[in-house]
Image (cartoon, grey):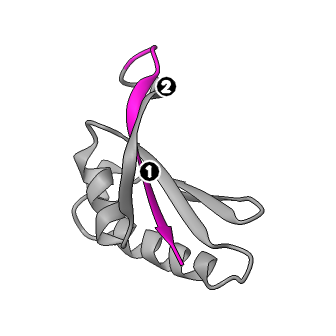
Amino acid sequence: MLEARVGAHITDIGYVLARAHWGKGLMTEAVRALTDAALGSPEICRVQASCDVDNRASARVLEKSGFSCEGRLERYTIHPNIAAEPRPCFLYARCR
């Protein structure tokens, strides 16, 4: 699953991939294609995504897709499968 939430000039993306398909480059290819399409739209100048600080594989997908880590957001997202409390995340973005 790859989701895009389009705003006035920013597109937020989120994704999840079944474990059986990890490590094949599928999500990197999908994120790169969606980001290229979004940034090809004249009104969108930024595509951003966040990932849990412990999810190195997700961070790597974003890095291989041309995103830069812009910072760490404390107590940002609740991941019910990890903890009931909000967890820190990294914010990544690719801009034109």
Q: Is residue 58 above or below residue 73?
A: below
State the SS at label 2.
loop
The three-letter amino acid code for the residue at tag 1 is Val
Q: Name the residue that disc number 1 marks.
A: 16
The three-letter amino acid code for the residue at tag 2 is Ile
- Mark 1 vs mark 2, foreground winner is 2
Q: Position of residue 80 (x, y in %)?
A: 46, 23
**Which image quadrant is residue 22 in?**
bottom left
Residue occupying image coordinates x 36% and y 23%: 82
Q: Position of residue 73 (x, y in %)?
A: 43, 35
Which quarter of the rendered picture does the C terminus lie within? bottom right
Q: Position of residue 76 (x, y in %)?
A: 49, 30
Q: Name the residue that disc number 2 marks.
A: 78
Mark 2 Cα-neighbour bin, 10 Å: few <14, some 14–19, many ≥20:
some
Q: Is residue 17 above or below residue 83?
A: below
Q: Mark 2 or mark 1, which is nearer the start of the sequence?
A: 1
Give the magenta range: 83-96
Report the disc number at residue 52. Answer: none
